[in-house]
Image: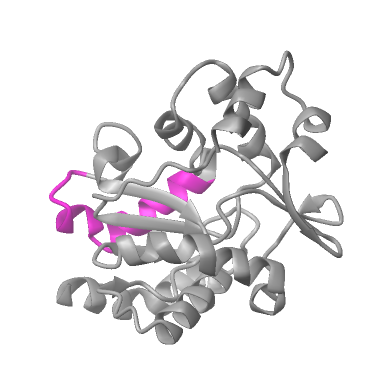
Amino acid sequence: MSKYLKKIKSLKKISKSNIVSGKFLIAKKDNIKIYYAPFDYVNSKAKIMIVGITPGLQQMLQSFEVINQGKSLKEVKDLSSFKGSMRTGLIKYLDELEVNKKLKIKSCESLFNKNSKYLHTTSLVKYPVFDKGKNYSGANILKKKILIEFIEKNFLKELKTLKKAIIIPLGNTVSSTIEYLNNKYDLKLACFLTGFPHPSGANARKNIQFKENKRNMKILLRNK
């Protein structure tokens, strides 16, 4: 992917029109387009893996800025992962499940700074996906050939590398996709917290879903 990194470093200005363009287009089919963004770093020694659907435009813009400023792929992940209220909600859920105690840290807040060595953040499709020019929501992901092929070629490797980690799927789409991969490839994931809600402010049911699944998730963590 070094050819893309060189292109990012040579950009005079980072804007949507500059980056959501043909020179960063990786694949397309019908209304779906996948563009490169520098989310390639994998922390293979992580103890917890948090999985989203795909980076959105805001994360894409920020990741390009980080590389354009001469920083590393690891710093892209550190600086672009789950910003603002979403991170706050995520930390609250993780601490309620006592993931912090499992990792022997005070709070999961430190996973995003001094204890980042324990964390790997990723997405089913690690590069940004646009559907008719807008952030892709994850709808019918297993039925979209272009996406499931990309997932089986790329994300599956990460899942195999980190199958002994605590795996946190952000929402039902991620849960069902990881379940599909786990069954199809007989991965025997050690601690997959199916039922974990997406902590986005747009998810009105997140607290209800968390309460409904909290007991089962705590049992999975206890048995790890």
Residue shown at the point (41%, 76%) measured from the top left: 194
Q: Does the magenta stretch include residue 65?
A: no
- Residue 106 on image: x %, y %: 18, 43
From the viewer's perspective, is residue 202 above or below residue 35? Answer: below
**Camera-nearest residue between 43 and 85:** 43
Residue shown at the point (66%, 48%) measured from the top left: 128
The single residue placed furthest to the front in the displayed view is 3
Q: Give the range drawn in magenta.
A: 86-106
From the viewer's perspective, is residue 171 above or below residue 5? Answer: below
- Residue 93 on image: x %, y %: 37, 58
- Quadrant in the picture for the N terminus: top right
From the viewer's perspective, is residue 160 above or below residue 220? Answer: above
In this view of the protein, can residue 21 be seen by the observer? no
Left or right of residue 30, residue 14 in this image:
left
- State the image quarter where residue 25 is shown: top right
Residue shown at the point (65%, 42%) measured from the top left: 36
- State the image quarter where residue 204 is shown: bottom right
In this view of the protein, can residue 101 be seen by the observer? yes
- Residue 10 on image: x %, y %: 67, 17
Left or right of residue 5, residue 118 in this image:
left
